[in-house]
Image: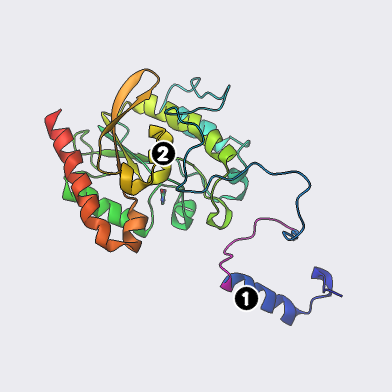
Amino acid sequence: MDKTQNDMTPHDAAEALRWLSEMGADEIIGESTVNRLVAPAAKATPAVARGTAAPAAAPVVVAPGASATQYQSLAEIRAALEGFDACPLKKTATKLCYADGNPQARVMLVGEVPDRDEDIQGQPFAGRAGLLLDRMLAAVGLSRSAQDRESAVFITNTVFWRPPGNRTPTEAEFQMCLPFLLRTIELQKPDVIVCLGVTSAQRLTGKPDGILKLRGKWVTTNVSGRNIPLLPTLHPAYLLRQPAHKRLAWRDMLMLRQMLDAH
Ligand code: URA
């Protein structure tokens, strides 16, 4: 017979914990265990893999009825997200990871999903990928800590809480965050948007292509009637894994610089 939690010896429990840790589990998300080998009774909402197409073809799809237009400032959006219990990710995340940088910035960067460092610090791009991002920005005269709007950037994400164990957010979780992202764009009024990685690029362009196809080309996205130039580029975490592609990201940064200088 299988051992249940209650008849485990301390040695068994320590071994089980060590095994889980070696398998990559780095946090507890429930009090009781779940047998994931038993088929669920009802089919769950299908997860959309990070890096796959957004389900709808039209640009910027918002769940029917979902809206965040009642919020009149970025501070109000942050406060609403702090109290937004509808998103299951909020229950397992340590901190909200909404935005960083200067709200007056001409450039808005939209990342993907918070990771461990962001979950601990409560700000986007707080870890190694963030350090690389800061260096990429500095190379073209931009910084998230700059006070003047010309050289500042504002950074936000597509999803505002770290999924447990870094799993891919479900489509429902993406859709819950999207109205807040769109309202953030409306209120921050960036001159240009840079999408860091395929997730935000697909969500904000409506194009299903991979990031190597999307990157390096300006497109126009329309958010609430306002046309905004948008440039998809490679995610810094991807560049840490594929350093040979840094040259592509560098080209994209130069395109961004040229666009800012020209307008
Ligand atoms: N990757 C992202 O896309 N966003 C973060 O905040 C951190 C890592």
Residue underneath mark 1: 18
Residue 250 numbered mark, or none: none
Give the vertical position of 25 relative to 108 (above or below): below
Give the vertical position of 54 relative to 69 (above or below): below
Give the vertical position of 111 relative to 23 (above or below): above
What is the distance, in whole Å, between disc 1 and disc 2 at their CAs? 38 Å
Looking at the image, which residue sits at the far bottom? 11
Q: Does the segment drawn in magenta span residue 30?
A: yes
The residue sitting at 33% across, 61% down in the picture is 240
The magenta segment: 22-31
Q: Position of residue 171 (x, y in %)?
A: 56, 40
Give the residue type that dot 1 points to. Answer: Arg
Q: Where is the N terminus found, in terms of image quarters?
A: bottom right
- Label 1 Cα crowd, 10 Å radius (few <14 / some 14-19 / many 20+): few
Residue underneath mark 2: 202
Looking at the image, which residue sits at the far top? 225
By secondary structure, the bulk of the magenta-drawn segment is best described as loop
As drawn, is 58 to the left or to the right of 139? right
